[in-house]
Image: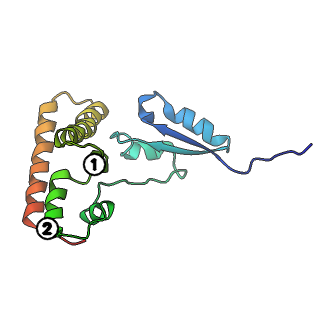
Amino acid sequence: MKTITRTKYLYLFVDEVQMCPKFELAINSLYSKGKYDIYITGSNAFLLSVDLATFFIGRYIEIHVFPFSFQEYCQYYDETGDREKFFDEYSIKGGLAGSYAYRTEKDRINYIKEVYETIVTRDFVQKYSLTDTLVLQRLSESSWITSATLLLQTRSVSC
């Protein structure tokens, strides 16, 4: 009889782990067995903070995922034509690749609003136990408007 030894890791993907109380204990327990290659994903403010780093000192690699740049947007759509027109489309659709799956502008806008609500409103309100969400909402909207204004003023189109 031949014995098979497992030399590869088992991959474990955990999403929205912060919703489980004391999740770090479970993750550390699994990690200590030496069998698992563990990936923790999410967009929650807790996962973006230094708090998470204290749970897994020296045992994690943080990977930032950003929206598409204009150049990446061009590559995604394999665009080589009219860059001005394409930039106009990009400025409307934005860089959130998840929104590209939606066929109508209304559905795309709803998706982007849901992402916004999840990250800015729910996650920060939950993490910091904020009671006055109106101030946070107005502040974030103001920063979006300022960013959009700066983008339009310094508009450069290059792929």
Q: Which residue is mark 1?
A: 100
* Quadrant showing the N terminus: top right
Which SS class for mark 1? helix
Q: Amino acid at mark 1?
A: Tyr
Instruction: Judge the density around disc 1: few (<14), some (14-19), many (≥20) Cα neighbours within 10 Å.
Output: some
Marks 1 and 2, Cα distance to the nearest angstrom? 19 Å
Q: Amino acid at mark 2?
A: Glu
Q: Nearer the viewer, residue 3 or 47?
A: 3
Residue 135, quarter of picture: top left
Q: Earlier in the sequence, mark 1 or mark 2?
A: 2
The x, y position of residue 95, in whole percent, is 25, 54
* Quadrant showing the C terminus: bottom left
Classify residue 8 as left or right of residue 156: right
Q: Which residue is mark 2?
A: 84
Q: Nearer the viewer, residue 159 or 26?
A: 159
The disc at residue 83 is none
Colour basis: rainbow
The x, y position of residue 13, in whole percent, is 52, 41
Residue 146, quarter of picture: bottom left
Instruction: Judge the density around disc 2: few (<14), some (14-19), many (≥20) Cα neighbours within 10 Å.
Output: few
The x, y position of residue 54, in whole percent, is 46, 45
Which SS class for mark 2? helix
**Image point 55% across, 33% down: which residue?**
25
Q: Residue furthest right?
A: 1
